[in-house]
Image (cartoon, rainbow, N blue to C red):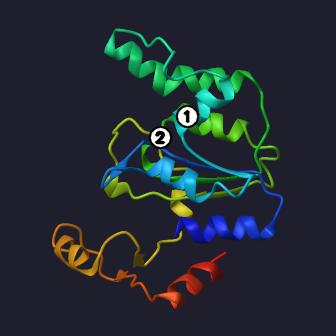
Amino acid sequence: PQAVFIEQLIRRGGFRVRVLHAHELHNRGIRLGHHLRDVLADQPLVTALHFHELCYDLLGLDPAATVLPDDPAERQRFFDLELAERVRALDLRRFDALVIDEAQDFMPAWWQTLESLLADPERAVRYVFFDEAQRLRADAAPVPGADEALVLGTNWRNTGRIHGLSRPVRPMASCTVATPDCANCLTAAESAL
């Protein structure tokens, strides 16, 4: 569904968009952030990164050359707080829209930093995707606006068989599975805009 919303922002034109996610997740060996970056390469105003890549990019740091603290707690603090604080201190207001995936795992400082990067926070567009059942971090911030969330009733991620097997573990009574010919599903998602 994120693709539908990104497509809408591109069609509206002129939006400087960052597509962000909490982790550099792997799916069948594909680094999802890099996959999104490749798919959106022809859109100069749209950039896909995971949160720390955004920080490194804006700070002009080379991740490979960055010396990380040896102490695990200090290293965690560096990624959870320090990078975000450094970016906020730059006082950059660069983006008109944010598309955030895996928002259930964003840290409090990350949300503050993302808000600080919006050119006009009152008018900025934010599409935030999350699933509390997939939360990996107990210390992550509550998702802003979660109480007003639009619940998507279509499972876009799994095959029908996987969806069926997961139902006893996590019941999704009204959830259906998107099929390859599900053009009406995309139309329904677009109309939610």
Q: CA distance from mark 2 to mark 1?
A: 20 Å
What amino acid type is highlighted by mark number 2? Ala
Dot label at residue 141? 2
Residue on which the image places disc 1: 53
Direction from residue 165 to residue 49 in the image, left or right:
right
Identify which residue is drawn at 50% across, 47% down.
34
How packed mark 1 is, by other alpha carbons closer than 10 Å (few <14, some 14-19, many 20 or more), is some
The quarter holding residue 119 reads top right
Query: Residue at the location (55% across, 82% down)?
Result: 186
Q: Quadrant of residue 174?
A: bottom left
Identify the image quadrant of the C terminus: bottom right
Q: Nearer the viewer, residue 90 or 170?
A: 90
Q: Residue at x 52, y 61 (%)?
A: 147
Tag 2–tag 1 contact (CB < 8 Å): no
**Disc 1 secondary structure class:** helix
Question: Toward the viewer: 171 or 53?
Answer: 53
Residue drawn at x 16%, y 73% is 168
